[in-house]
Image (spheres, helix red, strand yellow):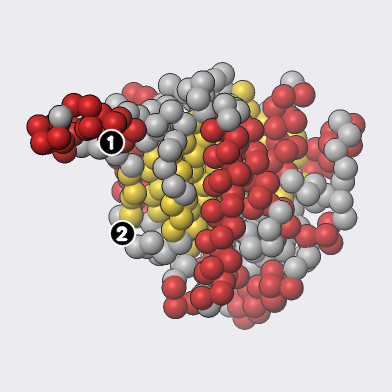
Amino acid sequence: MKRTIKKISCPSLAKSLCFLLFGCALAQAHHSHASEPPKFAIAIHGGAGTIEKSSMTAEQERAYRAKLEEAINTGYVILEKGGSSLDAVVASINVMEDSPLFNAGKGAVYTYDGTHELDASIMDGRNREAGAVAGVKRIANPINLARMVMEDSPFVMLAGEGAEAFARSRGMPVVDNNSFDTEHRREQLKRAKEKLDRENRQDKDYRAAVDALPAPFRMGTVGAVALDQQGNLAAGTSTGGMTAKRYGRIGDSPVIGAGTFADNKSCAVSATGHGEYFIRYNVAADICSRVAYQNKTVAQAADEVINQILLPVGGTGGVIVLDAKGNIALTFNTVGMYRGSRVAGGAAEVAIFGKK
Ligand code: ASP
């Protein structure tokens, strides 16, 4: 299954025809925008998986589309005003973390034991600075703490209580773990546990058990990649991890190179999917290495890693990828992926299912 959406600027043949037919001035006025690479761009995801139109009500679909659009536009406005890609990534992710629709922040899934453990990371494409937090239980917006680790500590990753103590020391308020409780995630845990216990496979194959749940119950790790007007890339990812995960389990989302990567010289990536595979296959960094060393386009590199390498070994999920020219790939090997993008001067484009 190959699903890649690639943004390309106005084909030069079409432009030449415009010139011939209507003259330079008109053609330029009309096409100057489309023929130039976008000066800034943003792409987001809200999780990948067996997301089918038939398993969602029209109202649920509308709610997801509206929230995705809000997240894109929140980041876009920052970029439009000349703000940094880091600010745009954090702002877009905050919109999704604050919504119960996504498996991050407010809507974080439950561990097998009924608690919430959140992971997040961020990377600055200018200098490969990065920050990450893993297994935090009391941080409302883990992406903000990841950024704080990057900017205000000599470390890249802080975990658990140490990360929360660091947050408190920097004046970031902590919240109760039960502030992440939601009815739909509790129901999801119940159903996942029933399935896991029945099949006696708590420690293995639980992704398959979770995949058997209805679409809105499963997915929703969130992520964003952005290119600002200064030409800098950034990437960020935030998640509650996987439903019914063993406590202490850390996925790919806070692992730089696996779930998140950004380097102005290659690309910015945020991933979603079965984290163990994304870690072992170093997915985000591998995509950017192909762009850097093999001159692959972001669409080619993402397709190779997601569809040709990950899928055959059973790794399901997807990525959003953006390069410093504004080329975007939204690539996944699952049935659907909550996703969207917006390039300078264009409108927000949002999609959920395979086709749209
Ligand atoms: N990648 C996340 C994890 O493994 C989950 C997901 O994206 O659905 O924790």
Which amino acid lies under the numbered mark 2 shown in the image of this protein?
Met
Residue 65, visible in the rendered structure: yes
21, above or below 177, in the image: above
Q: Position of residue 83 (x, y in %)?
A: 60, 28
- On residue 1, the disc is 2
Residue 206, visible in the rendered structure: no
Front residue (pair 97, 346): 346
Total labels drawn:
2
Q: Position of residue 127 (x, y in %)?
A: 56, 19
Q: Position of residue 270 (x, y in %)?
A: 52, 42
Residue at screen point 70% across, 32% down:
147
Q: Position of residue 124 (x, y in %)?
A: 58, 26
Front residue (pair 177, 157): 177
Q: Count neighbours of disc 2 (C-alpha within 10 A) and say few if under 14, some if 14 to 19, many if 20 or more.
A: few
Front residue (pair 313, 213): 213
Residue at screen point 77% across, 24% down:
152
259, above or below 227, in the image: below
Q: Is residue 125 left or right of residue 239?
A: left
